[in-house]
Amino acid sequence: MEDRTFDAIVIGAGFSGLYALHKLRALGLRTRAFEQADGVGGTWLWNRYPGARCDLESIEYSYSFSKEIEQEWNWTELMPAQPEIEAYLNFAADRLDLRRDIRFNTRVAALAFDETTATWCMETDCGERYRAQFVIAATGLLSVPLDPAFPGMETFAGEAVFSNRYPRDGVAFDGRRVALIGTGSSGVQSVPVVARAAQHLYVLQRSAAYTLPSPARVYEPGEFEALKADYVAIRDAQRSARAGAARTSAFAVMAQAEARPPLKTASRAEQLRAIEEYGVQGALFWSDVTHDMEAGDMARRLYGEAVARIVNDPETAASLVPDYPFGCKRPIIDSGYYETFNRDNVTLVDLKKTPIVEIAAQGIRTTQDFLEVDTILYATGFDAMTGALTRIDIRGRDGARLREKWSAEGPASYLGLLVAGFPNLFTLIGPGSPGALANVVSSLEFQVDWVADCIAHLRARGLRTVEANGEAQAAWVDHMNALVEGSVALHPSCNSWWNGANVPGKKRVFTSYASGLPEYRRHCEEATARGYAGFTLS
Ligand code: NAP
């Protein structure tokens, strides 16, 4: 008979779940991880769409806790593509012998806190019940698909696929007429790859993207070996970097811009020189662009000029210019996105001019046209940050439901680690953490270490629960909100997963801590040093 009582349950077997399982096991806790997929990898297992690639360097987007993994694994590319990251996580799972404690193909459906025993009762989608003192929700910030609801979607007779749960065996685009809906990171990365194979590609864009050329490339011979010998210095630099990444990344582009002069005082000649020299990036590369709405609008127009230098058709080029300020959404890194619109087999469909009316058996009807297609690739994003936790029926003290609390009051937590009223339920990379604004691997390693230290602290003192205090949580939420007040990320024109506005009906709240990872760490370490200030241990 399977043992169903554990010290700790970990939900998810992606980057954070794997490390949490390893760390808690090492602490001597009887730990079991539950994963809805049939393998490890989390986001990097599901999002296997064409062109999927990380926008941070592999040397930094990787575990730092294991010197063995650092030395035994060899990255082949500066910015790794999805297959290499998935292989890396499989390697880590094997190297740490984690699989024996992971239950695959099992979705956690419900969690209820039992006050009499101070344990969590967990129910899976098959109705099996488990119990544990601690639950670590390593459920990912971008793990719940957000599907559109176009009339007639279900009647489409061709192949419909989703970037965020892309088929393991791939999709044949060769010779097919393809429609791609959504131009966030996933869509923008897919476009050049699909265009090379498809007979015709229609890119259906609701909002244009700010996207910068990716520096992705294969390592030169000996290059990675040299980096590998320098891991200590690389990790040190990472630790003090605001975004948990000190080398090339989308974050670095924004950080570099802050050190440059303001756009508003730049002469026309300087502006033009910037886009001549740096292309689209030259339009955004100024210190005031993300802080001053007027500068943001100037940058947007300059960006349009840079796009028009690449895209031959003026109407297409104009449609590709965003109508919202840079900094509202996560910057995208692409490989030949704009150039792809010069291909004869690619058509941009501007949904702001001609919205989708319905999806029919043979294709997509817009207000102006009927696009006959064989395949539809949806790249429409995620119910991010909170979606994974609100999909689970979580009931804390007095039966209070997390999803109801977050829906009414906004997604509050203290330090992005625990939610008041939900003891011993640690939320990794969720709201209140550096989430969207830092290297997720750096953030999760810090959080998992903090959780393990906290559990060790409780056990050493014979304590059973740790819980966020309501006042400390409210103060943390106020502090987080103050950091982004007046920023473009909360501007009414900004509809992004960063602020929840991409999900109809979701409260518009910026859920990531905006002062950087070192400052976040300082807050957490300070709370610990002050005897877990802001938490109740009992
Ligand atoms: P996303 O950024 O939320 O983009 C979704 C796209 O779908 C948007 O263009 C959106 O338009 C469109 N869309 C949604 N519903 C639609 C509808 N009903 N009709 C028409 N268009 C619709 O999602 P994502 O591209 O999957 O990326 C999410 C995040 O994942 C990224 O920001 C990034 O953090 C991460 N990611 C990273 C990488 C990387 O490292 N390189 C790659 C992929 C993803 P609107 O903008 O108008 O809503």
Image: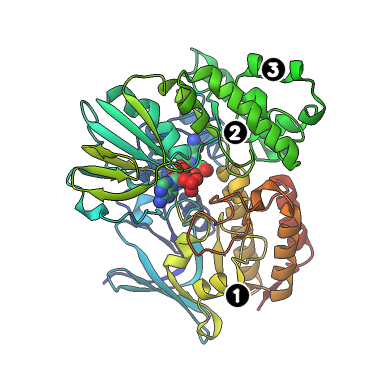
Q: Residues within 10 Å of mark 3 (few under 14, many from 20)?
A: some
Q: Amino acid at mark 3?
A: Leu
Does label 3 or label 2 sit earlier along the sequence? 2
Give the distance between the C-alpha atoms of the residues marked 2 and 1, in whole angstroms.
39 Å
- Report the residue that reaches farthest toward the right: 265
In this rendering, would 335 be left or right of 415?
A: left
The residue labelled by disc 2 is 250
Q: Which mark is residue 383?
A: none
Element type at marker 1? Answer: loop
Q: Residue at x 52, y 58 (%)?
A: 24
Nearer the N terminus, badge 2 or badge 1?
Answer: 2
Whether label 2 lies within 8 Å of ligand 1 gets the answer yes
Looking at the image, which residue is at 26% across and 53% down?
153
- Tag nearer the camera, 2 or 1: 2
Percent x, y of residue 264: 79, 30
> Is residue 364 found left or right of 17 in the rendered image?
left
State which tag comes first along the sequence, 1 or 3.
3
Determine which residue is flagged by label 1: 465
Q: Residue furthest front?
A: 368
Residue at 58% over, 40% down: 323
Distance from disc 3 to disc 2, alpha carbons, whole Å, reads 23 Å
Depth check, mark 1 against mark 3: the one in front is: 3
Q: Amino acid at mark 2?
A: Ala
Which x, y percent locates residue 538?
65, 79
Residue beneath label 3, please?
A: 272
Q: Position of residue 473 (x, y in %)?
A: 69, 69
